[in-house]
Amino acid sequence: MTTKQIDYCIELARTLNFSRAADNMFVSQPTFSYQIKLLEEEVGFSIFERSGKGASLTPAGSQFVNYLSGMRADLKRAIEQGQNFSAKYKDVISISLMVRQAVYFLPEAMRLFAESFPDVQISPKFQYENGLNGFLKSETDILFSLKEHTRQIPGIVVHNLFTSNIYLITQRDDPLAEKNLITEVDLYGRTLMVGGGSPAALKAVQHRLISTGKIRYFNSPDHDTTLTNVAAGRGVCLAPGFLNDHSGQFAWIPFDCKESFSCVLCTHKDDNRPSLKAFLDVLKELYRDAVAFPL
């Protein structure tokens, strides 16, 4: 199976017309049809049904093209990344994050790092799920994580980055947004969004509040859905400070509790590249200097 055949197949699935698809790919129709025939012979099933009106996808063909489209998009990204890398960089350091804002100073760290290591690329990878598994398979060089998730994992080095506290998120015109510190009593009679893969420390706080019987709760599947519900006035929520994108859309008010999150960066024990150490040092220094930055 060639990339040309993949492109022809995807284009025919889009147009469902051999003549139009051939024109769009700048080849003759016989050449186009022959390549589609070769592809079907290779995979062992009919991808398209031919008729006088054009073509239609078979059930197997429909599923095949869906996978093929995803594979082609991944291949395109891989080629583009390779072109970028070969043109300028000699090495790459990849960092896995659950969300962009988790390491707020990452863009600044990348800029500062490039001043000393212009030929080393920092490549962020956003993996809301399975980031740890990918890191353990050596698919990434650095993993942002909570310290509680890194215990008893062999072959890694854990670098303390910052401590993140718990905040209440409300609409900016909510009366609670005027407070400097939120207590349990402030939430009595309110609806609290809970769930959504909350870390253990946050779950403990949510459970403690709900168990008072004075706070209603509403289950929300993920953080983005929770924020949508808050924006719609359906309730308020508690969240780690490292999820704050500082866009100003919501009010983030510190919540009075003992729980917090120890945010760390993990690296592989056998990765001793000077560039990796230098990048970690840049990030650590930025967070040390940001004493007043709300986390």
Image (cartoon, grey):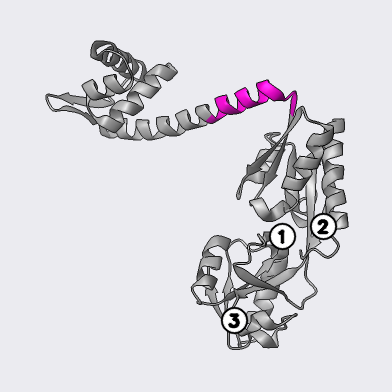
Please, what is the three-letter code of the amino acid marked with disc 2? Phe
Q: Residue 242 carries which label?
A: 1
Callout 3: SS: loop
Kindly identify which residue carries mark 2.
162
- Does residue 29 sit above or below 188 in this rendering? above
Quarter of the image for the C terminus: give it: bottom right
> Mark 3 packing: few (<14 Cα in 10 Å), some, or many (20+)?
some
Q: Is residue 249 on the magenta stretch?
A: no
Cα distance between the residues tagged 1 and 2: 9 Å
Residue 273 quadrant:
top right
Who is closer to the viewer here, 114 or 128?
114
Is residue 78 at least partly visible in the picture?
yes
**Mark 3 vs mark 2: in front:** 3
Q: Which mark is first along the chain, 2 or 1?
A: 2
The secondary structure making up most of the magenta span is helix
- Does residue 177 sit above or below 92 in this rendering? below
Percent position (x, y) of residue 78?
Answer: 57, 27
Who is closer to the viewer here, 91 or 37?
91
Percent position (x, y) of residue 291?
Answer: 86, 62
Q: Residue at x 28, y 19 (%)?
A: 22
- Does residue 262 sit above or below 55 in this rendering? below
Range of magenta residues: 77-91
Q: Mark 1 and mark 3 in contact (Cβ < 8 Å)?
A: no
Who is closer to the viewer here, 66 or 102?
102
Kindly identify which residue carries mark 3.
174
